[in-house]
Amino acid sequence: MVVNCEHVWREVSNYLEGEVDPVLRVAMEEHFKGCKHCTAVLNGTRNVVQLYGDERLLEVPVGFSQRLQHRLAQQTAPSRWRGIRPIWMMAIAATTLVIGGLALGSATVFRQPELRSQLAQSPHGIPPDLIVYVSDDSRVFHAPGCKYLHKKDDEPPKQMSASAAMRQGYVPCVRCLRQYLTADTECPRPPGSVSRWAMKREDKLNQPGF
Amino acid sequence: MGSVPQKLNIQVKTPDASEIRERDLLRRVQGGETQLFYELIKPYERRIYTTAFAILRNEAEAEDAAQEAVLKAFTHIGQFRAEARFSTWLTQIAVNEALMRRRKAHTEIMEPIGEREEEDGTYTPRDFADWREIPSEVLEKKEIRQKLASALATLAEKYRQVFVLRDIQHLSIEDTAEALGISRAAVKTRLLRARLMLRDLLAPGLGGAWFNRLPFEKGTKPW
């Protein structure tokens, strides 16, 4: 096999790498013996590889390692787990968001807000046949003797049963019928109540002029 | 006659101590011992920096890119799989980071030589001066190192990248190809041209008139 200069130039790098087949290697070596130009190219290319392969050629700047460590420490200090297992981190964050969202939703959507006015609270346990009084200028019904019953000289209060009053849209007085709205009672209970406190108050209600 | 066990001539590459240590460190870092990360990348600090420098040709930018590449490697260490070498993976990150910065900054100082030349074209040496053996002591001189670095900087990026990874970082042809995302053949072609171009620049000899041709300017290249 005979090779020319151009062939040698194409293969000189592979020759230095030891990546030419034995036949070509022998042919190139024969060529180098008789070609000064190609020998110069070979030697020069070898020198390039040798010189640039020396670690002293490209040096890292002074303090490079320290600055790199410092930056790395800064980046990793706030969270040692940053960058590690991001899927787990995302899963934890997502779970927290879901739980938080459900809790917030149940608090704001599914739960009845606390009623501010006692008049707006639904009565419960009022005896349907309890005698109550209503007046025309109010939508509240009262137990007999309640001082908060609006009384007009020309229009005496109407008497009806509690069930009838509620059907007509009246609501219980928060004072005299409070026990049917909350557990707390400060107003007189209507007759028939089993409360001891109410029994005492009943005597008062039966007094003349009350 | 009893059967004679045949000797199988199978050569299995056994990992050396440094490879075993690297694997162990890698496993521990991926397992959460992140404080060991610097120890893991420490052997490749220089490679990361010089890779970035080969592309950016600026010390400050190269250092910044190298730091950023290390941080990205830390962030994505959990995604690294053992199909590739850790060093090659790191080099790829450094290459990508430097290229991204270069695209952003448009820091092309001058038209690099050989940028528009066809890769499959034959490169013809321009200078046949005999370049005798050079003692390695010449590299002790800072001026010589600067001249060599300047010559390297004049190469087109695609040649410089390959040359830096193969002849300065001593990556294998395969690892160079993988780090740059090019074929093995392309690595060999670019490497040949890079070496011959540098030889043309440096061949006239140390201490000769050829140093006066540096730094090179556009249009004054010998090829």
Image (cartoon, rainbow, N blue to C red):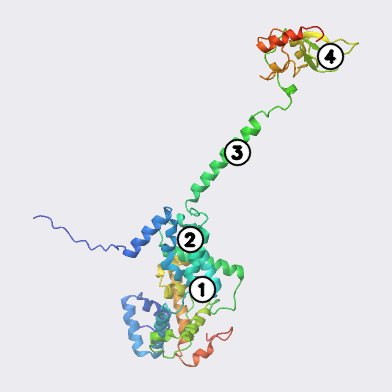
In space, the residues marked 4 and 3 are separated at their CA atoms by: 49 Å
Q: Residue B73 carries which label?
A: 2
| Res A112 visible | yes
Residue denoted by label 3? A101
In space, the residues marked 2 and 4 are separated at their CA atoms by: 83 Å
Residue denoted by label 1? B53
State which quarter of the image contains the C terminus of chain A.
Answer: top right
Q: Which chain carries label 4?
A: A
Of callouts 2 and 1, which one flags the residue occurring earlier in the amino acid sequence? 1
Quarter of the figure with residue A173: top right
In space, the residues marked 2 and 1 are separated at their CA atoms by: 18 Å
Kind of residue at disc 1: Phe
Of callouts 4 and 3, which one flags the residue occurring earlier in the amino acid sequence? 3
Q: Residue A139 carries which label?
A: none
Both marks 2 and 4 on one chain: no
In space, the residues marked 1 and 3 are separated at their CA atoms by: 50 Å
B177 shown above or below A139: below
| SS at mark 1 in the image | helix
Residue drawn at (35%, 82%) of the image: A28
- Relative side of A81 to A127, left or right: left
Residue denoted by label 4? A135
| SS at mark 3 in the image | helix
Tell me residue A204's x, y (percent). Answer: 75, 9
Q: Mark 1 lies on which chain?
A: B
